[in-house]
Amino acid sequence: MTIIASLLRAADLPDSPSARLDAELLLAAALGKSRSFLHTWPERIVPSEAALKFAEYLQRRRGGEPVAYILGQQGFWKLDLEVAPHTLIPRPDTELLVEAALERLPATPAKVLDLGTGSGAIALALASERPAWKVTAVDRVLEAVALAERNRQRLHLNNATVLSSHWFSALEGQRFQLIISNPPYIASADPHLVEGDVRFEPASALVAGVDGLDDLRLIVAQAPDYLETGGWLMLEHGYDQAHAVRDLLLIRGFEDVHSRTDLGGHERISLGRLPC
């Protein structure tokens, strides 16, 4: 007879700050219950089918596969999103982009563009908070477009549209009050690419040339052609790239250029406004 408390004690995941949380998330999913159920009923018997499913999940996690991919879902902002291995896993630090966008633009009608949307996390968070905004989310990976569209439909966010586009390629003639993006920004030789959860995420959504700035350069260079005067460009980047990204924005003629720090105290996003 196996009970919840003993299964969690025997989980034997690699030692990390999230090991206990990972085990709880996986067991709760195997049981079809919430994490609070595990704490409320630690002596409940685990059905054999659920125990076998938990063992399978643990084996995948011991191999390094991210919990989000094992379960096929991840929380972001106030949303529960479907995720899959052809998109990045939404991370809490990216919520800083959502916060900055909500602060800069009022709740009145506006056109917003999310470049490289992946699972749709940023676009759908904005659409959920600002019903008057028309949010366009684009990605060049067709599987990501389909995934973001499934999330959009499931969340009933009719003020968002998901399109296939390689950056601005399908947006000719359109203008936006805000362009926002979490593009690839890791250097091709960065050793972190073969460590931890990142090993399982798509390289196309991570790597951007020798210095990690290739896609950021392209977005900054082309964004003014798609922004309304006075519109904002907001970009996530690496913890050590803020100075370089601010320089790109300034050289391209943006004003009010500045960066904001993430939960770890690193300058993680940079933004600028197109002159009026």
Image (cartoon, grey):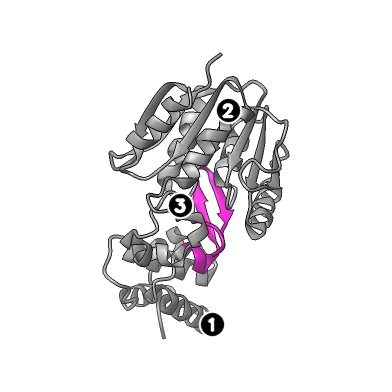
The amino acid at mark 1 is: Glu
Q: Decide: marks 2, 1 in contact (CB < 8 A)?
A: no
| Camera-nearest label, 1 or 3 | 3
Q: Decide: marks 1, 3 in contact (CB < 8 A)?
A: no
With 24 as the anchor, is 147 left or right in this view? right
Q: Decide: marks 2, 3 in contact (CB < 8 A)?
A: no
For disc 1, the marked residue is: 49
Q: Earlier in the sequence, mark 1 or mark 3?
A: 1
Q: Range of the magenta residues?
A: 68-88
The amino acid at mark 3 is: Ala
The disc at residue 224 is 2
Q: Is residue 76 magenta?
A: yes
Front position in the image: 180 or 84: 180
Spatial CA distance of label 2 from label 3 is: 21 Å
With 210 as the anchor, is 240 left or right in this view? left
Number of residues whose C-alpha sits closer than 10 Å to that of mark 1, classed few (under 14), some (14–19) or many (20 or more) = few
The disc at residue 155 is none
| Camera-nearest label, 2 or 1 | 2
Spatial CA distance of label 1 from label 3 is: 44 Å
Q: Residue at x 28, y 64 (%)?
A: 16
Q: Earlier in the sequence, mark 2 or mark 3?
A: 3
The amino acid at mark 2 is: Pro
Q: Earlier in the sequence, mark 2 or mark 1?
A: 1
